[in-house]
Structures are given as C-alpha cells and as structure tokens.
Image (cartoon, rainbow, N blue to C red):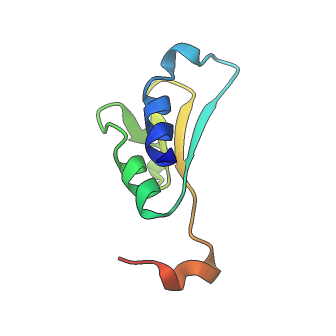
Amino acid sequence: GGANEVRMVLQKAKPFEDETNMIIGIFDADTAGINAFNGLPKDKFVRYKDSLRIKQLEDSNIYGIKIPIPPSKLKYKSD
C-alpha cells in the first residue's frame, strides 16, 4: 500500500534533500499509516520537538507526519 511506499521513500530520501528544501511524507491515521509511521527506524528518525505526530531524520530536512484524526471521526478510532 501507499503508506509503506511513503516510509520507504523517506528512508531513502537523504541524497535528494538540501538546506533549502524539505521532504515531507504524510501518513494517514489509519492502521496502514500508523504502522508505516511507527516503522520509521528509531535509530534514524527521532521525534521532532517531542511531537507524537512528527518524526525527523536526524540532521536533515526530512520529516514524516502522521495526520490527526478529525474530531468527527474519533468514534471510529480503535485503541
């Protein structure tokens, strides 16, 4: 699915980033998106400013962002 492709692109994006541009991967708040976001390697991707929704590839302008669940859809969230 798409979420795993986003994860893989972020993991391999370092050669394409520079000081003036950011690379941002956006993950849905569904099971596939959450699993892919959580699958970003912990030894390379760190929480950005203690955010639970943003991870940054260390020393780069590469980010993974997990979008929030809209309040109108919270009733569908499974814990």
Task: Say above or below: 13 vs 43.
Answer: above
Residue at 51 percent across and 62 percent down: it is 29
Residue 33 lies, in percent from the top left, at: 46, 54
Task: Say above or below: 78 vs 50.
Answer: below
Task: Say above or below: 15 vs 41.
Answer: above
Residue at 54 percent across and 37 percent down: it is 63
One can see residue 52 in this view: no
Where on the picture, by quarter, is residue 73? bottom right
Residue at 56 percent across and 70 percent down: it is 69
Left or right of 43, for residue 47: right
Residue sitting at the far right: 20
Residue 61 lies, in percent from the top left, at: 57, 27
Residue 65 lies, in percent from the top left, at: 54, 48
Image quarter (top left, top right, bottom left or bottom right) of the C terminus: bottom left
Query: So how many labels did they put on this image?
Result: 0
Residue 42 lies, in percent from the top left, at: 31, 39
One can see residue 10 in this view: yes
Task: Say above or below: 34 vs 26.
Answer: below
Residue sitting at the far bottom: 75
Observer-nearest of 63 and 9? 9
Residue sitting at the far front: 1
Residue at 37 percent across and 40 percent down: it is 40
Left or right of 59, for residue 70: right
